[in-house]
Each structure stands twice: as structure tokens, then as C-alpha cells.
Image (cartoon, rainbow, N blue to C red):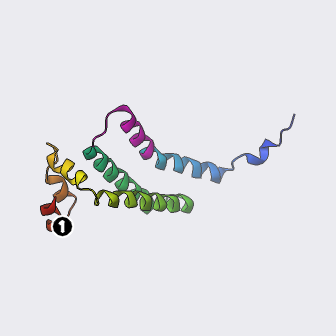
Amino acid sequence: RDLGLWKFELNDEEWAIAEQLRGVLKILKDATLFFSRSTPNLATVILAMDLIDEKLTTYSCNRQYHSSICSAVQLAKATLNWYYQLTDQSEVYRIAMVLHPRHKLVYFRNARWEDDWVTTA
């Protein structure tokens, strides 16, 4: 019996786009699973945001990705950056990084924060 579902079948180009999207979404899945399994602290949130931003930047610059994927990645990066800038409004994030035994002020210097910002932190 024909249910008319064949019209929803993906063509080769759509499968290629879906495959690219799967690769891009993996970083978000990994972050979600990481924070679901453990008790996150503020320092790990910032580091995760940095890693996601780095990956999204790499994806957005990759000319092998379909233009729709690049556009979606740029929107995701803009959304992430909006949330990231919100951390600047809370001293708690900077305090968490400075007090973290592994990071201290090294994180801010490695992230190339301006000296005034590092001093404020």
C-alpha cells in the first residue's frame, strides 16, 4: 500500500547536508552529555564555551560545508557569543576561574585578555 511517503525521501545532496550537520552537532551533543553526567562548575562552563566556540569557528571557515550549514553555524556562534558576553556581567565567573587551582590567571592570559581585564579579574 502506498502511503505517499516517497515524496519525503532525501536526495543525495540532502543526505550530504545531513551528514555535515551531524558532524557539527556532535560538539553540542558531547557538551550536553558531559554536563548531564557530572556536576558542572563555573570554570568548566567557560572552558566548554571556549571549546564550542573554537569548533564552531573551524566549521564556519570550512569551505567543504554546504552554505546552509555555514549559515547555521554562524547563527549558533552568534548565539553562543551572546551567552558568553553575559558571563562578563557576573563577577562570579571570573572569580571561579581565578580560584580554580588549575587555571588561576593563566586562563585569562592564554585567552589573550587585555591586561586591565586580567587585573580586574
Residue 7 placement (x, y as % from top left): 78, 48
The one nearer the camera, 52 or 79, is: 79
In the image, what residue occupies the spot 69% across and 48% down?
10
Residue 84 placement (x, y as % from top left): 34, 57
Kind of residue indicated by mark 1: Glu
109 on left or right of 8: left
- Crowdedness near tag 1: few (<14), some (14–19) or many (≥20) residues, C-alpha within 10 Å: few
Residue 30 placement (x, y as % from top left): 41, 40
The one nearer the camera, 34 or 89, is: 89
The residue indicated by pointer 1 is 114
Residue at the outermost right position: 1
Give the main secondary structure, helix, strand or loop, of the magenta stretch: helix
Image quadrant for the N terminus? top right
Image quadrant for the C terminus? bottom left
Dot 1: what SS?
loop
The stretch in magenta equals: 28-41
Q: In terms of image quadrants, where is residue 62?
A: bottom left
